[in-house]
Image: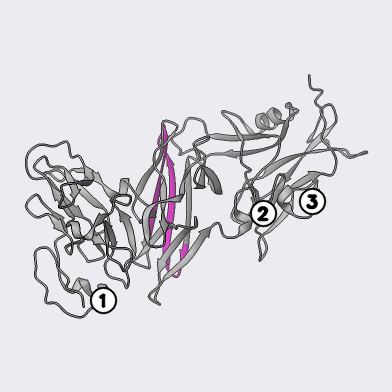
Amino acid sequence: MWKMAFRGTSCVPILILPLLSSLCQSDDQLTDAKPLSAGDMLVSKGGDFALGFFSPNSSNTSLYLGIWYNSIPGRTVVWTANRDYPIAATSSPMLAITNNSDLVLSDSQGHTRWVVKSGITGVGVTAVLRSSGNFVLQSPNGTSIWQSFDYPTDTILPGMRIYLSKRARVVRRLIAWKGPIDPSTGDFSLGLDPKSNLQFVIWQGTMPYCRLSMLNNESVGSGIYQNTIFTEVVTGTGDGFYYKFLVYEGSPYSRLMLDYMGVFRFLIWNNRSSWATVTEHPASSCDLYASCGPFGYCDSMGTVATCRCLDGFEPAGLNFSSGCRRTKALKCGKPSHFVPLPRMKAPDKFLHVLNRSFDECTTDCSNNCSCTAYSYTNLSSNGAMADQSRCLLWTGELVDTGKYSNYDDNLYLRLANSPGMHHSILTFYYLGT
């Protein structure tokens, strides 16, 4: 038996599932005169999202302020305010707009568990749960002061615009739950690599767990799944990057989520009344960071992803834990050539050289005895960054690369010439110093 209480209305106690809570209508706004208490909810216009207090387990001892889908079975939480500061159910949590126009979550003992400073004096500040699932604190004239879309937890919703980096600093990451029923800060996070600001990485603590894609100034990915059209856009702003996820038609519910096991999924609500996984990373153990060892790569072109050695290399041991070794040693002062390897994911630990043409990138690598490979991409002319090239160089071992059908770049791998070998274009001599 649940007794559902809603702000601005009264509900007759009936035997229902949380799914049917939309039978009782509720406000979508919070004002200084109407705080939100345990049992109350804000419901967005159209009824797709709800904001209120929830307990992730059956004990109901700890409460969190969160946003979830309101019109589908179960409770799929997409944002949590006080993830590391739960409130005991006996402490009467309350979300209120204070006399200072701040948005404050507190308990009956007067302890503040979460706060948003408005910076505005006077009356008229409100908070509204929009139909997109965005919770917005706004001034009396409707100007946004703060919004939950700028502070995601483990989920990205359609329409979110997330700043990934600014002035060479990573400013936002997704952070997974600690466990399936524990919203607190978990071990896994997803964001840009702070060393380069050029690639998405899933982190386990401070260690890379899975590298995703390299960024261009205008990276666009799109697809169709069961009549749902979706697009991902990463845009350069001149001093950083932001990410936007869009869904145009099809399923009314879709989301990107980093789960507590470190898997990043694109999920769509399907006709069978369940969440369907469209894509996920890592897709196999082969996708885990450096799983194929130095100079090994994850070949995902077949039915099953498999570790293999790069051209000119052979396994260094019985398995790929030790990676691969050259079949012919590469030495300074000896002739070498570059082999183009198509559809390759760029290895990690690269050097990004600015303002280079393809030929200049090739020359930079060939003239450096320690350079083992290079890659080149001419970035979109619509990007906001001044340098429209991406020349990447590698010295030493090549770690965490792979071959994928949806990758377009070539990796140019340096190999030693064999006796009698003639390469009129890509053969180089470097005497060293």
- The reply to whether dot 1 and dot 2 touch (C-beta < 8 Å) is no
In the picture, measured across the screen, residue 139 lies left or right of residue 355, that is left
**358 over 185 or under it: above or below:** above
- Cα distance in 3D space between marks 1 and 2: 46 Å
Mark sitting on residue 298: 2
Residue that protrudes farthest toward the right in the picture = 420
Residue located 11% across and 73% down the image: 11
Task: Please say whether residue 19 is one of the residues in the magenta stretch.
Answer: no
Q: Amino acid at mark 2?
A: Cys
x, y percentage for residue 336? 81, 34
Whether residue 245 is in magenta: the answer is yes
- Front residue of 51/248: it is 51
Circle nearer the N terminus (3, 1): 1
Between 367 and 204, the residue placed more toward the observer is: 204
Q: Please determine whether, in this image, residue 280 is positioned above or below residue 163.
A: below
Label 1 sits on a secondary structure element that is loop
Q: Nearer the viewer, residue 350 or 96?
A: 96
The percent coordinates of residue 87 (x first, y second) are: 24, 54
Q: What span is colored magenta in the figure? A: 224-247
Label 3 crowd bin: few (<14), some (14–19), many (20+), radius 10 Å: few
Q: Residue at x 32, y 63 (%)?
A: 56
Please name the residue that numbered disc 3 is placed on.
317
* Amino acid tagged 1: Leu
